[in-house]
Image: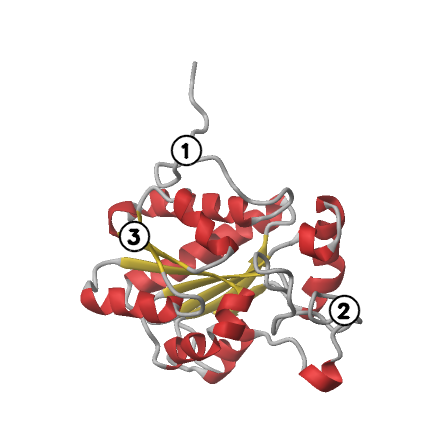
């Protein structure tokens, strides 16, 4: 019988540990497919944080390293400096990248480190209790915004890939995707491949943000959580490429 599909070599057989409806499992599979297709498994290093993103190391059949909460870009930059031939992926949640680690995230982009950052934006701190993050939507209820986020007090949700595209002329690539349907999955796979190709070509910093549901903390079913991404998140966090490879800053 002809084999038409098999588990990517870069993806381990370890069973997923994510909550029902979470998209981390889909994303780590996409990353593994891209790694196999690009033939870079032996050179790849996944830098993972504390929290939900840290569980991805169990699914990665290639080198991984844990980092302190928010310090993933610094860890990734150090690995890249010590071994320039490695392909470094910094895998983070929005709370890790944009709250606890905003200084590390900002400065890695500012310094134009030749690393690839993948941020899973589910508009809250997932594993630590569903607290408000810098990407929490206006009016969204979390464990630390029980009446809904008041942007007149907290400021508005940040759109970091757009900041990279607008403010860091040396950066190589910035995009945002999601996995709400097959078309978006295929687009996101292309974004991840572009981000890694930028690193392979020594073009500089690349970031791909991924809109992902957190059904448990959102208090929604997996289906309703997917609908929320389409109806509420994408209008504020548009998907697409904000800075393409080789594109000059406008």
Query: Residue 2 shows which numbered tag?
Result: none
Residue pushed farthest right?
A: 147
Q: Nearer the viewer, mark 2 or mark 1?
A: 2
Q: Which residue is mark 3?
A: 44
State the SS at label 3: strand
The image position of residue 164, as x and y in percent, is 48, 77
10 Å crowding of disc 3: few (<14), some (14-19), many (20+): some
Give the residue at x 25% y 51%: 43
Q: Is residue 212 visible?
A: yes
The location of residue 58, given as percent across then percent down, is 41, 43
Corner quadrant of residue 127: bottom right
Residue that mark 2 sits on: 146
Image coordinates for residue 70, horizontal then vertical, percent: 44, 69
**In-front residue for pair 117/248:** 117
Q: Is residue 98 above or below residue 54?
A: below
Q: Position of residue 184 (x, y in %)?
A: 60, 51
Camera-side residue: 154 or 236?
154
The mark nearer the N terminus, 2 or 3, is 3
Estimate the spatial distance between the alpha carbons at disc 2 and disc 1, rounded to whole Å: 39 Å
Q: Alpha-carbon distance for marks 2 and 3? A: 41 Å
On-image quarter of the N terminus: top left
Q: Residue at x 52, y 79 (%)?
A: 163
* 181 on left or right of 55: right
Q: Write the residue at 48% across / 58% down.
A: 191
Residue at the spot of label 1: 13
């Amino acid at each position: 019988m002809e084999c038409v599909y098999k588990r990517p070599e870069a993806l381990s057989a370890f069973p997923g540990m994510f909550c029902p409806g979470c998209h981390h499992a889909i994303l780590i599979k996409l990353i593994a497919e891209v790694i196999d297709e690009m033939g870079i498994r032996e050179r790849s290093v996944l830098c993972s944080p504390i929290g939900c993103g840290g569980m991805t190391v169990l699914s990665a059949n290639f080198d991984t390293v844990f980092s302190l909460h928010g310090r993933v870009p610094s860890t990734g930059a150090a690995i890249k400096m010590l071994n320039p031939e490695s392909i470094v992926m910094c895998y983070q949640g929005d709370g890790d990248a944009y709250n606890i680690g905003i200084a590390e995230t900002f400065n890695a982009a500012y310094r134009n480190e030749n690393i690839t950052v993948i941020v899973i934006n589910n508009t809250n701190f997932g594993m630590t209790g569903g607290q408000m993050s810098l990407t929490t939507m206006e009016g969204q209820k979390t464990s630390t915004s029980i009446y809904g986020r008041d942007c007149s007090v907290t400021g508005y949700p940040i759109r970091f890939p757009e900041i990279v595209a607008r403010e860091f002329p040396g950066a190589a690539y910035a995009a945002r995707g999601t996995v709400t349907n097959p078309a978006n999955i295929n687009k996101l796979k292309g974004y991840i491949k572009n981000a890694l190709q930028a690193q392979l070509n020594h073009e500089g910093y690349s970031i791909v943000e991924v809109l992902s549901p957190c059904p448990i903390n959102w208090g929604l079913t997996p289906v309703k959580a997917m609908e929320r991404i389409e109806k509420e998140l994408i209008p504020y966090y548009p998907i697409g490429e904000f800075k393409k490879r080789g594109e000059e800053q406008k």
